[in-house]
Image: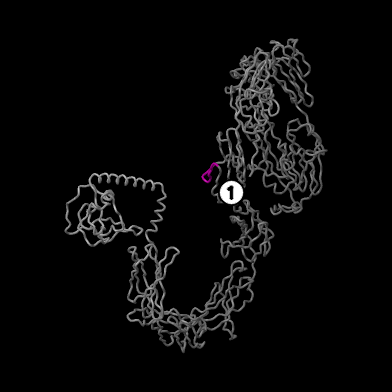
Amino acid sequence: MARQPAPPWVHAAFLFCLLSLGGAIEIPMDLTQPPTITKQSVKDHIVDPRDNILIECEAKGNPAPSFHWTRNSRFFNIAKDPRVSMRRRSGTLVIDFRSGGRPEEYEGEYQCFARNKFGTALSNRIRLQVSKSPLWPKENLDPVVVQEGAPLTLQCNPPPGLPSPVIFWMSSSMEPIAQDKRVSQGHNGDLYFSNVMLQDMQTDYSCNARFHFTHTIQQKNPFTLKVLTNHPYNDSSLRNHPDMYSARGVAERTPSFMYPQGTASSQMVLRGMDLLLECIASGVPTPDIAWYKKGGDLPSDKAKFENFNKALRITNVSEEDSGEYFCLASNKMGSIRHTISVRVKAAPYWLDEPKNLILAPGEDGRLVCRANGNPKPTVQWMVNGEPLQSAPPNPNREVAGDTIIFRDTQISSRAVYQCNTSNEHGYLLANAFVSVLDVPPRMLSPRNQLIRVILYNRTRLDCPFFGSPIPTLRWFKNGQGSNLDGGNYHVYENGSLEIKMIRKEDQGIYTCVATNILGKAENQVRLEVKDPTRIYRMPEDQVAKRGTTVQLECRVKHDPSLKLTVSWLKDDEPLYIGNRMKKEDDSLTIFGVAERDQGSYTCVASTELDQDLAKAYLTVLGRPDRPRDLELTDLAERSVRLTWIPGDDNNSPITDYVVQFEEDQFQPGVWHDHSKYPGSVNSAVLRLSPYVNYQFRVIAINEVGSSHPSLPSERYRTSGAPPESNPGDVKGEGTRKNNMEITWTPMNATSAFGPNLRYIVKWRRRETREAWNNVTVWGSRYVVGQTPVYVPYEIRVQAENDFGKGPEPESVIGYSGEDYPRAAPTEVKVRVMNSTAISLQWNRVYSDTVQGQLREYRAYYWRESSLLKNLWVSQKRQQASFPGDRLRGVVSRLFPYSNYKLEMVVVNGRGDGPRSETKEFTTPEGVPSAPRRFRVRQPNLETINLEWDHPEHPNGIMLGYTLKYVAFNGTKVGKQIVENFSPNQTKFTVQRTDPVSRYRFTLSARTQVGSGEAVTEESPAPPNEAYTNNQADIATQGWFIGLMCAIALLVLILLIVCFIKRSRGGKYPVREKKDVPLGPEDPKEEDGSFDYSDEDNKPLQGSQTSLDGTIKQQESDDSLVDYGEGGEGQFNEDGSFIGQYTVKKDKDETEGNESSEATSPVNAIYSLA
């Protein structure tokens, strides 16, 4: 993570701005002025012969200048040459060759003259040359014969071109010649061999010249080499040999210089150019070159080494770089030195270039022309293109060497003066005019400009002006105070005000006032100060594995009045935001990071005034690249050295290398791991097996993963040998009662050690000392037939190939095949332990009757019947195993209250023997299993119905069921209640005592032994719990409160309407207390009040008006069913009754007698529903 400094161009631009602030003041173009050259071609103007020639010359002045040219110091008459024309309003020459002509005819020295009535300005003397790319002379080159180890120079001698061509060496097949410190190209284009080696004959050598203007390449006929050697075999393994030359029989020798010759030389260079010093040496071994300066150090900021240290380049040479330099060539045989004396000369360069002089009538002034060079340049003055000596005399002008002094100038003094300073290395020509004007001050920039600047920055306020005499300029802030100059302010000659560090209080209106004797002028600039753009949370350097997601933060603070733009750079180039990237205001996210995403990421936060940069580096960890260039060396009978070049670790260090091999005899194409080595090595000695045609490859491993395997090495076959081991896992087992199968694990390719691998199989009966039987087998099994039943054998398997036998093998004991046992267990005794288990005991059989290996005693048993009548049972046979030579065991998981039968057998590897006599036993009564399908239903809030089915296994005579239940509400638990039922009862109804609580029921069946497994269920949750929770949530909602308020308002309105109508139409008795007739003496009826007491549900005396307007006779039955709409009453979710009080109709109910009076408020509410 790093905050980036301002780009270099910002500082350069500011420096250029400061330099320009002190320059001469320009005359506005609407005022008369002498000519000024604004554009011209370079002094050495080289042109392409295939194009038209352009010689540029442009100038300004008022009136507009006219142009003419000289060629080779003589007037060039453009009108006489139809190919030559001059551009309109310009002095630029155009020479057109479309209709023919030779460009070479126009070579020469050209100079442009721009003239108006106030003077003449001159261009540089432009030397026009046509580019040349001459053909290479054809020549037949004989092969170059050279002794191995000798030096050699192949000369290029390119044809002279203009400009000089670029030289490079290639083979005739256009392959570049590989260069190193032994073979390299010199600055003159020759190819130097410090010593020739045999491999240099493998190609030819052709010098090529590329010409810049024509874009052509010319190729010289190739050189072929014939190298004489004492070691004719080009063994590539010797190239990296530590003593390569002695290994090839090349004599070693001390260095000597091939270029430059001798021990000393000199070189001249011009100031400002590049100095190139070169030393190329021969020797065996190849010498190393080092550079030194006598009496001092090399200039580290300007010196750099090139061409494998054979060249030293010093850029932008100055006089301090003159002196003696020497190169030192050394190898182990010795060293040699060459000294180069460097002289620095200089073409003229400006110390004080003449500038335009603007004067008022009667003013004094001077033109200064100072230059330096080596040798010292001479100065020549001219006026309007003519030598000053031949110009008309001017009493107001005085020449004093490099200075012209003007006194009491008048209008007639206007002219253009030229200063030409030259020495043997070049010249400088400068134009400077003298203009005499009488002009009051004037402002040259738009009025009332707005300048916005960033806080704490350096800035300048421009106020370009003109006047003659040159006006004085003063700055004021906010129309008051003294002149701004000094401290934080500085005023330049051209009128610009520099504020060195902007502060908030610098904001305001600045006024510049220009004054001379002819008047004054002023302008205003409004300055606004803005907060800087700053990245306060910068992206941080990150290390990520390939395929992960990375987020780079970039949070910015900026002035809110400025528009912010955030962009990203990758490796200092604009970042393309693809579909794997997401750019947000304050971050950049990269999904599925890949190797190509590695690099530096720069967040650029910019406004129209400033910017801030922050950079972070993303390192992507990837699997390593595959190793390459596998090489086998140190070849031996049982080992080889494998060397490889590691691939790129992709930023995660390589921890291990796995070497794999493949052989083409037993498993061609299948790779096996051979060995593993640390990641710090790239060479290993591999132990090999005889008679294997090896091929190797290497896999690199880092913490991210494994690389792709390297390309395979060349094959290497080891010589054969007798086997050094025998096959393993030898076994002898019978597959039938009269055979024995001998098997083993076959040996692989690395243990075969030779061709035709086979196995010598030997066997004989154990302890009989009979002769060995043997047979040779090519597979991995052999079957011995006609063997006695289950007899031990000694077995041996020995490996053999064409080179001999393996070591003598160890004997392995195997057995022939088994037969079924001939005897059954005797004296089988059964003892009942409990209702589900029995214990067994028996006598072992004789070993000779087993006829094999005794695996186990096995009991077969089955359930014959249940002691319960009419209960069906499964008689499926089951078994219990007792491994080994045991005499007792336990059979469990039996069904209680049942009759069982049991038999026992002996088991060996072949199977079961004969059955023993059948034993019968009976299990006692047990506890029943759990009742099945226990169901809890809640038809209403007052009762809970329970139902269940009989147990699947009664396990005895059922005595009944036990039900235990308890009420609970959250953590509160009530008293447990126990109910006992008969064995035939499978239903029960519980009357709820608490409508809110839930119930937990536990049910079990029981026999005389006890209660069996219980089953537990709970009653469902009461509906009002969910309703209450939901109601609490809804009651806090704004919409629900509003709705309830609206309903309440509507009900209130309806009640008021009903009361009004009732007051108009009479009173309506709602009810009557018991045994009290309805009459006017009732005080509550008189004032129209309603009595809603707890006795509302009591029967009324006499008839009453029902809610639907019908008349109903008094009935004694007052149940809630009579008031409901069906057989059952309706209950709210909290258990409260919500049925409508509709009157039960009787068969002899009378119709009619409907009241015409207004309905009651209750009726009105129900009518809305």
Q: In this picture, which residue range is highlighted in magenta?
A: 577-585
* Above or below 409: residue 803: below
Measuring from the top left, give residue 1088's x and y in whole percent: 27, 49
Q: Is residue 437 magenta?
A: no
Indicate the quadrant where residue 770 lies: bottom right
For the residue pair 447 and 696, the one nearer the viewer reads as 447
Asked if residue 96 lies left or right of residue 158, the reply is left
Q: Position of residue 307 (x, y in %)?
A: 72, 41
Task: Judge whether 638 appears above or below 490 on screen.
Answer: below
At 38% from the left edge and 46% from the top edge, which residue is drawn? Answer: 1042
- Give the SS element for disc 1: helix
Residue 774 figure quarter? bottom right
Q: Which one is in front, 951 or 439? A: 951
* Residue 102 in sight from this viewpoint: no
Q: Nearer the viewer, residue 556 or 304?
A: 556
Instruction: Judge left or right: residue 1037 versus residue 489.
Output: left
Q: How many marks?
A: 1
Residue 584 among those drawn in magenta: yes
Residue bearing mark 1: 595
Tell me the residue at 36%/68% (across/down): 935
Callout 1: few (<14), some (14-19), or many (20+) C-alpha neighbours within 10 Å? some
Q: On the rendered structure, is 295 left or right of 1069?
A: right
Q: Is residue 1001 visible?
A: yes
Query: Where is residue 274 drawn, in percent x and y?
Result: 73, 34
Q: Vertical placement of 661 versus 598: above or below?
A: below
